[in-house]
Amino acid sequence: MSLSDEARQKIQEIAARYPRRISATIPALYVAQAEYGGWLPKEAMVEVAEELDVPPSHVFGVATFYTLFYKEPVGKHVVQLCTNLACMLCGAETLQQHLERKFNIKINGSIRDGTTADGTFTVLPVECLAACGGAPCMIVDTEYYENLTIEKVDKILTQIATQPTVFFKP
Amino acid sequence: MPTYEDFKSQRIVHKYIDVPGIDEIDVYMQHEGFEGFKKALTMKPEDIIAEVKASGLRGRGGAGFSTGMKWELMQKNVEPRYVVGNDDEGEPCTFKDRELSEKLPHQIVEGIMIASYALGAHKAFIYVRGEFVKGYNQIWKAIRQCYEKGLLGKNILGSGFDLDVVAHPGAGAYICGEETALLSSLEGGRGYPKMRPPFPGQVGGGLYRQPSVVQNVETLSNLPAILRYGAAWYARIGVPPANTGTRIYSVSGHVQKPGNYELPLSITLGELIEVAGGLRPGRKLKAVIPGGASMPWFTEQHLNVVMSFDDITKAGSLAGSGSVIVMDDTTCVVKAALRLVEFYKHESCGWCTPCREGLDWLVKILHRIEHGEGREGDLELLADMGDNISGQGTLVGTFGTHRTFCLLGPSGVSPMRSSMNLFREEYEYHIKHKKCMVNG
Ligand SMILES: Cc1cc2nc3c(=O)[nH]c(=O)nc-3n(C[C@H](O)[C@H](O)[C@H](O)COP(=O)(O)O)c2cc1C
Ligand code: SF4
Ligand code: FES
């Protein structure tokens, strides 16, 4: 697989926004991640480097610094479950335990441990999502869901399971 | 008992937040939108800087530095120069900037337009946290609509002033909220903080080593009203002369109506908790973190503290990002502190040893105390290690005492040190009885 012409064009368009093209590294990685089904294999990073005319090592360095770039395959939908203080005070642990049991996964930050057997979801514990007014909360793909309860989470995930993935496209 | 209704008429940044469609430029313009910027275009840049300084506006991102003074200090006569909006909101339990991005994106853009005109910048960036997909799209929508109306681009409204604004996504790294790490990230690299001096406003310290000003997006959102109504009007609100205006307090945790409340800086902690619905029935207040997770904790003794920058400092904490985390008597403080220190450990950029290794050790020890495996001497060990990260007994934010490259490391010590100072007996109980004093 390789980046589509459309994705390459998008990267060029983004790069032109900046005084220096290297500044487009993060947005370009998002474009590539969406093309590659939600994660960044090495060849995707090499292609980004080519498009931006920067060393591949620079792109690897950036991709490995930021948590929203996934370096191994993820499930169809990534669930980011907030476990920071406000959500913890409002019951995030109960949700975490519920999802671990329901899907027979471990929500410990490892993509492999957090991915359901059928590959529909990867659930990751994340730090404060800036939605603490609606704690506990989560992001599925790119959408926020707040004031969660076990029932609400079950309903949301059942609905989303059959829907196509929504990727962030800068 | 005060309610939010009593204060709503005093809102500045959230004045029009409830207006349907306010995130569209036409509606925004029907509600004083871009009047502040248009006023700015009739003024000399140095007069705008003087006006902003006279308003008393201080940064809403964390440090509370005078915005006008920061603008005065920016190195002059060097081109190009940049203004950067900080919308990376990652301080645990702070959630005001996400709401501003989603609901009032034009106001952020208008703020950065005013700042850019005053500072002579022709290119500005808004660094939006990667998770804020909706906020990012809303800010881009606002930017595009401004171009369509001739409010951005070349020769804006015939004034001869040119400006381009670009929204830039982050990708999940708390450290990128720190202004120099943010600049590293915007330059396309890993989010490592930069050495100071030179400061961002000086040659060598800013974006692409050019003079730059980084401003929190709530700070920027105050500028349109300051320009519209003048510094004297703004400077009467809050606790003049040094703590003026309103701020958006993000209240979370054990209150009945958590949320964002824009209130004058003269509000007390007790009133703020009431405005947020008060505690749940039958519960007692245990602890409050008044300025984001990095700040020293308060207890019910502090309910009369005025939530201004200087009053919070006087009472022994810091106003930080304006978030207020409320914990009632069902909370295990060891667990709460552990969760926060884990956060800082996770977000350490790894650049310097005391932070990268020290926070990891704090977590290990706190973890064993929390899980009934604490040892005698652990509390002394924690205190000693804390001193080796943040300097002996100092508050976060006291530049010059900490032993790390930036303030993330010391921020990670604060929850442990502060909770241990206030609730030492709970830590001791955990170690002695191998269980929690609150939850068994
Ligand atoms: C570890 C760390 C994280 C920070 N995170 C943020 C942030 O998410 N948003 C923000 O506006 N400021 C943050 N700051 C403060 C910025 O460094 C900077 O002071 C601020 O953006 C300046 O804008 P202001 O004067 O308008 O507040 C952080 C500081 C530190 C040390
Ligand atoms: S204190 Fe921590 S976050 Fe800051 S530079 Fe050092 S390692 Fe990085
Ligand atoms: S603690 Fe969960 S969104 Fe802030």
Image (spheres, rainbow, N blue to C red):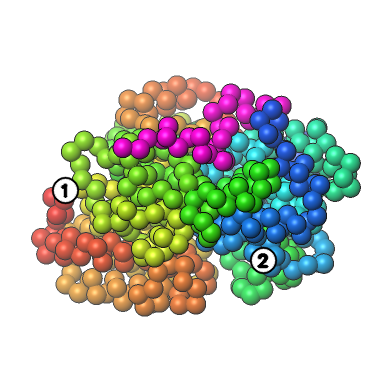
What amino acid is found at the position of numbered circle 1 in the picture?
A: Asn
Q: Is residue A106 visible?
A: no
The answer to which of B168 and B39 lies nearer the viewer is B39
Side of B248 where B86 appears, left or right: right
Chain where mark 2 sits? B
Q: Position of residue B398 (x, y in %)?
A: 46, 71
Q: Nearer the viewer, residue B49 or B333?
A: B49
| Residue B331 falls inside the magenta stretch | no
Q: Residues within 10 Å of mark 1 (few under 14, many from 20)?
A: few
Task: Name the mark on residue B200.
Answer: 2
Q: Earlier in the sequence, mark 1 or mark 2?
A: 2
In the picture, measured across the screen, residue B31 lies left or right of residue B328, that is right
Secondary structure character of the magenta stretch overall: loop
Q: For the residue labelled by badge 2, is the local secondary structure a helix, a strand or a loop?
A: loop
**Boundaries of the magenta span:** B1-28
For the point 31% across and 29% down, the residue is: A150
Mark number displayed over residue B439: 1
The answer to which of A149 and B324 lies nearer the viewer is B324
